[in-house]
Image (tube, coloured by chain):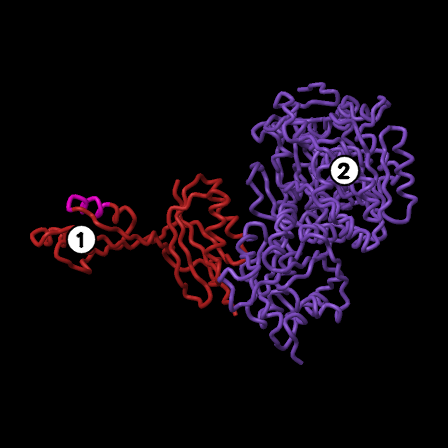
Chain colours: A purple, B red
């Protein structure tokens, strides 16, 4: 039986187990939209294509499945770009489907034509332009396979409009035909043995866990390894949740706004086992002064990450979970009391609690920590970018793997609200909180309409300090308080929420926080709380850009070296 | 240091764009690039000359290999490889000077492939150094135009097993 290209597309998505697609219709996907009601797939109508890409991203991160978004040609496709780039930087499995103008006019600057495969070349794992209906099923097979295997990433499939209407026989290929693609490499047992020897011989070993541990599902193996070997664990921003935040061996996040104990441990350790991370500049500070006493072992699934930013002493190209599972039995049980006592002393010195203490001010750290307390660290929190994101990372101690969803690599403001829509649709069993600043929330605030339309009980905390706060912090610290273009005159966010049909609350005092959070949790539907926090509160600890991790400012700007 | 890399890539639209885009965005310094069909239908073989230290070259190789359409990349710099390029050189020569130019070209196993009233076109194949040397010798006559393919490379001896390409459907 012959099917149209549009039908073939949906058949392929059904065959891939796709349950939900985030998107916006348009002229160049009109055939695809027309065929949609005949297939068991939920279509979430967003308010901007950027929101569709972020929602697919949030869905993918919350579920581990491939997120799918759909947009029309030209402006629709171009609006996906920020969301695709976000997913690319954070290795998120995504398939973006775009309509393209008919093959007969491709290349003629036709109405709503844009070269989206050209535009997305450097921000996709791979992309395809489909100009023959017979190619559609094999291309989609390859797209999903590429998106979810190896180091995951976004794949874009651009489908010309005539292809959607053309007819062809349909059979979904069993395998993708990609001779140049090697997503998996077998572990070399000798190298794993060598890592075990290094770990067993080390006095002050440290693990730094990245997104790869979570993407591979290796969190249990990670915790097992840490407990067996008495090895403390720090994480990257995207590695948060790989070990429970309250675990005694969890040191919190490392890097520019990392904890004192994590950064000191990096600078002091004699063995650094880096797993599923890529030594981002925000993590390592001055690369020449990074982990100066350590033998560095780097485990990553992407060979191109080995030696890119930091040259390791030993490298293994492997899936993080497979590696951890192979390493675990080879590691000798140890307690390492002295090393852990040293770390515990740094933890006491860190001043982490001080912003939580009564000061007569409404401090953002306290707001985050109250949300943590009320949700017992077991909500999915989707954070935006900037100060709110760092405070979330520092003061929400994630108990569940994958429960922090945030734009790490690209640092995309406006990510949180649409990504939370995807996260909640993917995980309706978990409470989902949005933590966003007053700047970021306004970049995608129209998605409040999608929240209502889809009936999603999101709890949205706006950390409202009236500034583009992270830039203001840099202006304060490095530009002599020249607050140029960072002060925001904001609308009343609670009223905005109410206008969309969302319960809106505003909190101006510390003693109103607990009650507002409770009220939000007890309300069935979505709630937005505008927390009008201390305007000039800074994110500390902080390592100035390019400085060694040992040089930090602690809360109250106390400097340590 | 300059490295010569040989890559096997799928012969599909846009592949060259993907590779060149990678060089541009990661700021790798590409000196020459030669592309053509390989022994296997559907596969092209490219020879790149890239400038960079060992760490940069290692990254170039790995980043290229990450491209889905790139099947294999090999750095042949340290290997016993035959590396050749072809150049066409249009050189000014009066009727009296022609003999001298032809002689020089022949010393370099080049040949004259076109003759005009006051110029000759010389074709020469060889290593980059050899081509450079002939150009230096021809300069006093006045060079009007040069076209060079950039080097192509092949390792001597039996074809290494790991470099054999699975035939695409």
Under circle 1, the secondary element is: helix
Q: Residues within 10 Å of mark 1 (few under 14, many from 20)?
A: many
Does residue A231 show up? no
Name the image quarter holding residue A76. Answer: bottom right
Nearer the observer, A545 or A453 = A453
- The disc numbered 1 marks a residue on which chain? B
Nearer the observer, A312 or B158 = A312
**Quadrant position of the C terminus of chain A in the picture:** top right
**Quadrant position of the N terminus of chain A in the picture:** bottom right
Look at discs 1 and 2 and give the one toward the viewer: 2
Q: Is residue A158 above or below residue A250?
A: below
**Residue identifier under label 1:** B105
In the rendered image, residue A227 lying in the magenta stretch gets the answer no
Does residue B107 show up? yes
Residue at the spot x=41%, y=42% of the render? B51
**Residue identifier under label 2:** A491
Q: Bounds of the magenta span?
A: B133-141
Query: What is the distance, in whole Å, between disc 1 and disc 2 at their CAs?
Result: 79 Å
Left or right of A435: which side holds B29? left
Nearer the observer, A3 or A109 = A109
Residue B143 locus on image (x, y percent) = 20, 48
Nearer the observer, A374 or A6 = A6
Residue A305 locus on image (x, y percent) = 58, 44
In the rendered image, residue B134 lying in the magenta stretch gets the answer yes
Q: Main secondary structure of the magenta part?
A: helix
Q: How many marks?
A: 2
Q: Residues within 10 Å of mark 2 (few under 14, many from 20)?
A: few
Under circle 2, the secondary element is: loop
Left or right of B27: which side holds A521? right
């Amino acid at each position: 039986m012959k099917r149209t290209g549009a039908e073939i597309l949906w058949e392929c998505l059904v065959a891939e187990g796709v349950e939900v697609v985030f998107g916006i219709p348009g002229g160049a996907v009109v055939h695809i939209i027309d065929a949609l009601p005949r297939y068991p797939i939920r279509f979430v109508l967003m308010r901007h294509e950027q929101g569709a890409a972020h929602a697919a991203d949030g869905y993918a991160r919350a579920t581990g499945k491939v997120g799918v978004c759909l947009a029309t040609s030209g402006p629709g496709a171009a609006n996906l770009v920020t969301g695709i780039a976000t997913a690319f930087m954070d290795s998120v499995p995504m398939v973006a489907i775009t309509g393209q103008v008919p093959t007969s006019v491709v290349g003629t600057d036709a109405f709503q034509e844009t070269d989206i495969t050209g535009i997305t070349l450097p921000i996709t794992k791979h992309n395809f332009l489909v100009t023959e209906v017979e190619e559609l099923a094999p291309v989609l097979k390859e797209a999903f396979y590429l998106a979810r295997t190896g180091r995951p990433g976004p794949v874009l499939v651009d489908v010309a409009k005539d292809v959607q209407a053309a007819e062809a026989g349909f059979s979904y290929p069993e395998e993708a035909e990609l001779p140049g693609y090697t997503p998996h490499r077998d572990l070399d047992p000798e190298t794993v043995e060598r890592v075990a020897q290094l770990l067993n011989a080390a006095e002050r070993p440290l693990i730094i866990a990245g997104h790869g541990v979570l993407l591979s599902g290796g969190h249990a193996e990670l915790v097992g390894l840490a407990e067996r070997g008495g090895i403390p664990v720090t994480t990257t921003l995207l590695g948060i949740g790989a070990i429970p935040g309250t675990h005694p061996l969890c040191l919190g996040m490392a890097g520019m706004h990392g904890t004192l104990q994590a950064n000191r441990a990096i600078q002091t350790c004699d063995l650094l086992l880096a797993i599923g991370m890529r030594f981002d500049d925000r993590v390592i500070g001055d690369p020449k002064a990074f982990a100066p006493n350590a033998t560095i072992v780097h485990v990553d699934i992407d060979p191109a990450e080995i030696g890119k930013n930091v040259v390791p002493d030993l490298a293994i190209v492997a899936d993080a979970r497979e590696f951890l599972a192979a390493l675990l039995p080879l590691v000798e049980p140890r307690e390492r009391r002295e090393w852990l006592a040293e770390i515990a002393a740094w933890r006491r010195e860190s001043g982490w609690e001080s912003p939580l203490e009564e000061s007569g001010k409404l401090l953002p750290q306290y707001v985050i920590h109250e949300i943590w307390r009320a949700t017992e660290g077991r909500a999915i929190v989707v954070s935006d970018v900037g100060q709110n994101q760092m405070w979330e990372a520092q003061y929400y101690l994630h108990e569940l793997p994958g429960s922090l969803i945030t734009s790490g690599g690209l640092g995309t403001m406006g990510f949180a609200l649409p990504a939370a829509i995807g996260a909640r649709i993917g995980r309706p069993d978990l409470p989902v909180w949005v933590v966003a600043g007053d700047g970021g929330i306004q970049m995608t605030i129209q998605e409040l309409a999608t929240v209502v339309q889809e009936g999603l009980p999101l709890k949205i905390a706006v950390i409202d300090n009236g500034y583009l706060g992270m830039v203001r912090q840099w202006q304060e610290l490095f530009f002599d308080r020249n607050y140029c273009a960072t002060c925001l005159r904001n609308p009343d966010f609670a009223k905005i929420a109410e206008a969309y049909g969302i319960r809106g609350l505003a909190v101006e005092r510390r003693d109103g926080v607990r009650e507002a959070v409770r009220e939000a949790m007890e309300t069935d539907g979505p709630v937005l709380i505008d927390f009008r926090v201390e305007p000039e509160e800074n994110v500390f600890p902080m390592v100035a850009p390019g400085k060694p991790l040992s040089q930090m400012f602690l809360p109250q700007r106390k400097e340590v070296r | 240091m300059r490295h010569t890399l040989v890559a096997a890539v799928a012969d599909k639209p846009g592949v060259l764009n993907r590779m060149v885009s990678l060089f541009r965005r990661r700021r790798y310094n590409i000196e020459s690039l030669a592309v053509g069909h390989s022994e296997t239908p559907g596969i092209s073989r490219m020879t790149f000359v890239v400038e960079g230290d060992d760490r940069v070259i290692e990254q170039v190789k790995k980043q290229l290999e990450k491209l889905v359409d790139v099947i294999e990349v090999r750095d042949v710099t340290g290997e016993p490889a035959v590396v050749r390029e072809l150049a066409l050189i249009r050189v000014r020569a009066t009727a009296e000077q022609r003999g001298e130019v032809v002689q020089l070209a022949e010393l370099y196993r080049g040949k004259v492939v076109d003759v005009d009233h006051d110029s000759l076109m010389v074709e020469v194949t060889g290593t980059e150094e050899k081509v450079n040397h002939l150009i230096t010798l021809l300069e006093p006559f006045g060079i009007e135009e040069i076209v060079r393919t950039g080097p192509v490379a092949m390792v001597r001896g039996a074809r290494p097993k790991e470099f054999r390409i699975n035939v695409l459907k």
